[in-house]
Image: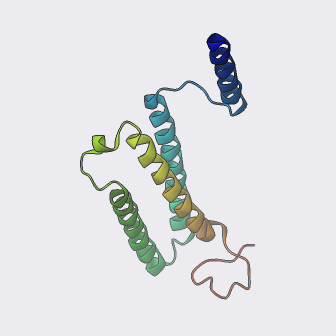
């Protein structure tokens, strides 16, 4: 009877893992995957940021202010991450720490990409709060 219960529990667990797409990954692989997604988001952020700078190249005041804003965002991003993980020894948060850090960095980076896209893509004409953002064609 005990063997039957164990086999049933194993089959239920196996079916659940298959149904949710779970794979056998090591923590190292999960860390690498999460950090890879963050690196991709960071590359996209840099691409969009450069696009904004090119698109507004004629407005030196805007360029100066945008560069200040971007440096401030990087400072915020790093400080925010440090506030979540204040212990200077990352090992104190366990083996998931690299993955968690990269997930947070990816989310923050995606938020910044969304903000910069408004300058890169433009906003709807009639947006009275658009400020320096150009209108879509």
User: Which picture quadrant has residue 129?
Assistant: bottom right
What residue occupies the far front of the structure in this picture? Answer: 1
7 or 71, which lies in front? 7
Q: Quadrant of residue 4?
A: top right
Task: In the rendered view, tell whether residue 41 sits above or below residue 129.
Answer: above
Q: Specify the farthest residue to the bottom.
A: 128
Drawn side of residue 101 relative to residue 136, left or right: left
In the picture shown, does residue 4 fall above or below 123? above
Q: Provide residue 21's location: percent of width, then percent of height.
A: 67, 31
In the image, what residue occupies the spot 24% across and 50% down?
88
Residue at image position (65%, 22%) is 9
Q: At which x and y percent is residue 30?
A: 49, 34
**Image coords of residue 91 (percent x, y):** 29, 40
Q: Residue at x 55, y 57 (%)?
A: 110
Q: Is residue 62 visible?
A: yes
Look at the image and tell me whether residue 42 can be seen.
no
């Amino acid at each position: 009877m005990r063997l039957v219960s164990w086999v049933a529990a194993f089959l239920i667990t196996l079916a659940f893992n298959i149904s949710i797409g779970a794979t056998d990954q090591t923590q190292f692989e999960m860390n690498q995957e999460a950090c890879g997604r963050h690196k991709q988001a960071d590359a996209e952020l840099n691409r969009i940021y450069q696009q904004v700078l090119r698109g507004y190249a004629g407005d030196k005041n805007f360029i100066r202010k945008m560069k200040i804003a971007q440096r401030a965002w990087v400072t915020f991003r790093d400080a925010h991450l440090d506030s979540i993980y204040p212990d200077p020894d990352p090992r104190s948060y366990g083996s998931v720490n690299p993955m968690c850090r990269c997930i947070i960095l990816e989310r923050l980076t995606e938020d910044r990409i969304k903000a910069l896209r408004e300058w890169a893509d433009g906003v709807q004409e009639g947006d009275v709060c658009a400020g320096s953002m150009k209108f879509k064609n």
